Image (cartoon, helix red, strand yellow):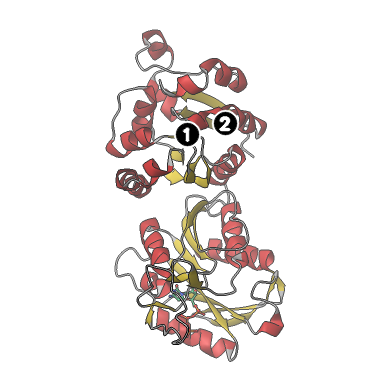
Amino acid sequence: MLAGKRILLIVGGGIAAFKTPELVRLFKAAGAAVTPVLTRAGAEFVTPLTLGTLAGEEAHTALFDLTKEVEIGHIQLSRSADLVVVAPATADLMSKMATGAADDLASTLLLATDKRVLIAPAMNVRMWEHPATQRNLATLQKDGVAIIGPNAGDMACGEYGPGRMSEPAEIVARAEAMLSDGPLKGKRIIVTSGPTHEPIDPVRYIANRSSGAQGTAIAKALAALGAEVVFVTGPATVPSPSGVQVVKVETAAEMLGAVQTALPADAAVMAAAVADWRVENASKAKMKKDGGTLPTLSFTENPDILATVSQLAQGRPKLVVGFAAETNDVVAYATAKRGRKGCDWIVANDVRPETGIMGGSENAVTLITEAGAEDWPRMGKDAVAERLAARIAAAL
Ligand code: CTP
């Protein structure tokens, strides 16, 4: 819930602005007060009257309205909020934020604020993928700006891909997580989850049976305790949780890159089932049967994300938690793995097919810490996640 919280909502000039009346309505329904601010272009897509009426207070548009500057200055406007939400965050607004431009009310507020900022990017897929936008995104991430979306899908411009603004309900869930007063408030935690897909050729890949259920439950439990969660997920079968920053990847190399971009963090929980190997020379074209010889795949080892993060000389998260999926000698192998990789804790589980754990809804884990091995009874993956999140909160 957002009772007693004030959201400063900055609406950029994109077609996704049509979702902002619903966003204001949902923020109000969750108990928040909303101050709408529209850029000049934003006001072309949705009227200040609509947003002002739904918010129950005036929507602001221009910078140099002197009467209002006396009544409520832009500095005060930017400081009186608990959270600044930019939706839609256009490529232009992101660029202004990344460079510190302040040539209208919206960009001035963003430069003047001392509050956390959540942006919901929305733009054409090519604009999103352009190196300039990706550079700006990386800068904003490093500046501590929280990002939600964009989602992939059909776009108003007729193209398909990432670029759609997150749904209003997703944005509200994320704002609630960011403003929650739980024991992990102010802590940034990276969670990896799901399998990775390692390409053989453009249509074939090597994968594993991980559903992403345990990592998803952990991300959800950490967010519920108030953590800012960056959820780096391979192609999982369960949907990503709400209230977290979702970064979708396919390969182990991409997962490592996404984790490195998400650092620094207070903790990292590596629940992904990362492929140990990838095909050395994945074919650029589809491999064809030639009626005789069988293809030979040669493999090379993938980077070990858990070991890389655990052994960082600088900027290592205070707590690094790994998983160990084993089919025999679980505690012995997991204890050795903890030492070899250099992580603080290992959550070990027995993934023999007869346990039904991999891809199932329950888990039976042993938590291995410096103090030794601790068996947890078999329970739902959500319950394992909540217990682990509580332990993480106590340790940070
Ligand atoms: N892991 C990782 N990067 C890899 C491989 C594994 O980050 N390239 C992480 C997993 O997310 C997990 C832990 O390391 O937290 C252990 O994964 P697991 O597959 O059990 O171990 P392996 O490193 O593959 O070791 P082994 O093959 O000896 O079981």
As rendered, which of 79 and 118 lies closer to the eye? 118
In the depicted structure, whether residue 25 falls above or below residue 192: above
Farthest-out residue, top: 67
Q: Residue at x 54, y 30 (%)?
A: 6
Label disc, if present, on residue 358 of the rendered structure: none
Q: Secondary structure at mark 2?
A: helix
Name the residue tied to disc 1: 88
Q: Amino acid at mark 1?
A: Pro
Q: Secondary structure at mark 1?
A: strand
Cβ of mark 2 under 8 A from ligand 1: no
Q: Position of residue 386 (x, y in %)?
A: 64, 63
Q: Position of residue 67 (x, y in %)?
A: 40, 8
In terms of image quadrants, where is residue 65?
A: top left
Q: Is residue 58 visible?
A: no
> In this image, 349 relative to 255: left or right?
right
Asked if the residue at tag 2 contacts the one at tag 1, i.e. Cβ–Cβ closer than 8 Å, the answer is yes
